[in-house]
Image (spheres, helix red, strand yellow):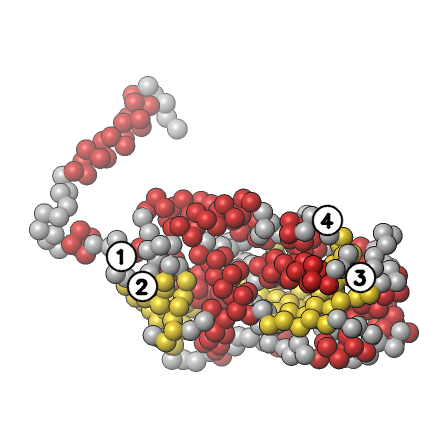
Amino acid sequence: MDKINKVVLAYSGGLDTSVILKWLQDEYNCEVVTFTADIGQGEEVEPAREKAKALGVKEIYIDDLREEFARDFIFPMFRANAIYEGEYLLGTSIARPLIAKRLVEIANETNADAISHGATGKGNDQVRFELGAYALKPGIKVIAPWREWDLMSREKLLDYAEKNNIQIDRGGKKSPYSMDANLLHISYEGLVLEDPWTEPEADMWRWTVSPEAAPDKPTYVELTYRHGDIVAIDGVETSPANVMAKLNKLAGENGVGRVDIVENRYVGMKARGCYETPAGTVMLKAHRAIESITLDREVAHLKDELMPKYASLIYNGYWWSPERKMLQTMIDESQKFVNGVVRVKLYKGNVIIVGRKSDDSLFDENIATFEDDGGAYDQKDAGGFIKLNALRLRIAASKNRHF
């Protein structure tokens, strides 16, 4: 092992990272700095302080990153309408570059040699954390215990904790789902979900009611956009993090945001996961609605062509890459005139767009009308347009090239 004097650990205070903390102290004989991020997971992060102190940690960072997370990561991603493999709104993926950034910052502040995380060797998160860290601090060392130790089961972790006097609530014999939560989503993996044929248990979901149990009366919400970002809900200006919290509540109460998918991980395997993304589901639909009246056709189509690449970059851990930054510059430029208001109806798991308006709208009622347009559009022009576009087809047909 390389000599490590000090390491910054992404620390939640749960079983895995508590064991990692002690394991780093013993195996690397080094000082450990803990970093706990509040990114809107809905659980108290302060108890991690006492747990870290009990294990002899002297430098403890507990940071409220909710506003930065929403403003600098979630909102830019939604300007791109990013969605991975048609269904996944990238809730876990988009949080990792922020955590990597803060790990590196703390390493610089504390003169640490390395960072450490609790991601397993089978998942995407190890890639996301480490690509981010190397992009921001090329010489940083990374310790990934799951790729080094032999504690490959929950029972082994619990036994290690017991032998080392690490206070952990065993919580019964049954392991909980593997869950990750932040302002954008909560995810579930493991247990019965490892069989893609098995329906999730009804009591698994935490943020949303089932569509069947949602209110019989719809909820209407008006979202105000400025340069592609939501800046007000029902006319009341609010911050990015508060936008997420408010929409999570409203959409969750109406059964919006559940998905059950099998996705292709970057490391090569398929994995089944369930996600609740109430706010994100509304935001994606509403953003496309405001773009539908404010974006030029070719700009909108080009964005749609580039979006899968942008989404894959985030999913695979390349947030800090030059290609993602290049795409972001183009996307942000496209949002100059994405201003206005979208009216949304939330009803039993559905997000229904029922209105959109903008002072920058390209929708012209005088041209689009089915009634007399007063000469605004000469329908005779369409004949020549069609013949020109049919020319290559007619030439091919005249040569008996039948496709």
Q: Nearest to the eye among marks 2 and 3: give it.
A: 3
- In the rendered structure, which amino acid carries the disc numbered 1? Ser
Is residue 163 or residue 386 the one in the foreground?
163
Numbered disc 4: secondary structure = loop
Percent x, y of residue 90? 56, 59
- In the rendered structure, which amino acid carries the disc numbered 3? Lys
N-terminal-most mark, 2 or 4: 4
For the residues bearing labels 1 and 2, Cβ distance under 8 angstroms: yes
Q: Choose top left, top right, bottom left or bottom right for residue 184.
A: bottom right
Numbered disc 3: secondary structure = strand
Q: Is residue 194 visible?
A: no
Q: Can residue 400 be seen in this view?
A: yes
Please tell me the numbered disc located at residue 139.
Answer: 4
Q: Residue at x 81, y 78 (%)?
A: 54
Please tell me the numbered disc located at residue 361.
Answer: 1
Percent x, y of residue 91? 57, 62
Q: Choose top left, top right, bottom left or bottom right for residue 46.
A: bottom right
Numbered disc 2: secondary structure = strand
> What residue is shown with label 3?
6
Please tell me the numbered disc located at residue 340.
Answer: 2
Please tell me the numbered disc located at residue 271.
Answer: none
- In the rendered structure, which amino acid carries the disc numbered 4? Gly
User: Residue pushed farthest top?
Assistant: 399
In-image side of 11 versus 82 (left or right): right
Disc tally is: 4
For the residues bearing labels 4 and 3, Cβ distance under 8 angstroms: no
Is residue 220 or residue 69 the one in the foreground?
69
